[in-house]
Image: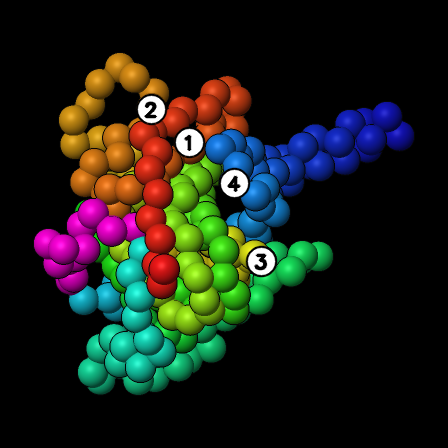
Amino acid sequence: MKWIIVLMASFMLMSASVTGQLDQYSTSTAGGAPTPSNPTSPESLGLQIPSVTSSQMAPAVQERTQGLMETDQQSAYAAAPQGLTATATGPTYTQMIVPTGTYAPNSLYISYAPQTITGCNLYANLLLWMKTEGSGNIWFYEWYPPNGMLITKYAGYVYYPGWYKRWFFADVPGWHILQYYCNGWSNYAYVYVYGPGGYWVNPTPNPSPQPYTYPYPYGQGQIVTTYPSTGHTYYSFKSSTSIGS
């Protein structure tokens, strides 16, 4: 009987190591950012790694230093590539995965609406489309592979509900989970970045454990980086952006 219990305990530990990625996502924030829920991992959702369907894009010069830009619904849906109508509306790529047990009125799409799951190449730039249902501060969250590191960035203040956009930069291979807060949470967006392995790719290596943030196309706001394994938190500079004032 004792060896059966030992085997069962070993199996439970092995199972926890396989499915334990969910518990490793950081939810620590600072600088006044609301604390998010622990996101659901792509593995727990059974998401298949998507093919690279997004075209190569780059922010315009005037957009490189803007954390948030006004747009409209027509632009968000018109961004879908020609000939990919089935992909743009297919259930595989448009799952609305929301945090459980909390208020989530806002919407977040990746590349084009209504897409919420996509794949791209390393160092690609993708548009994020945000439909807010109210006014307030916008905080943007990104969970990084492979250890659930969380980067929190203040994107700006909006004075009325509507459509806004910002840029995502694919700087690390693996699954990225995105979300934002504006007087309520958004759904999650999932991006799989293709690259040479599940580790941080640093164009300019240095001994500091702080992630390399250039060439993020956003030049405003504060980045708060938390490492779940060590509990260390790092901060960038802080400024503010207002939309609709």
Q: Is the magenta stretch mostly helix, strand or loop?
A: loop
Q: Which quadrant of the view contains residue 6?
A: top right
User: Foreground residue, 38 or 66?
Assistant: 66
Numbered mark located on residue 33 in the image: 4
Residue closest to the far front: 245
Cα–Cα span, label 2 and label 4 = 20 Å
| Residue at figure coordinates x 30%, y 33% from the top left | 200
Q: Earlier in the sequence, mark 2 or mark 3?
A: 3
Q: x, y percentage for residue 55?
A: 18, 67
Q: Mark 2 points at which residue?
A: 210
Q: Earlier in the sequence, mark 1 or mark 2?
A: 2
Circle 2: element type: loop
Circle 1: element type: strand
Cα–Cα span, label 3 and label 1 = 22 Å
- Disc 2 marks which amino acid? Gln
Q: Give the range drawn in magenta.
A: 56-67
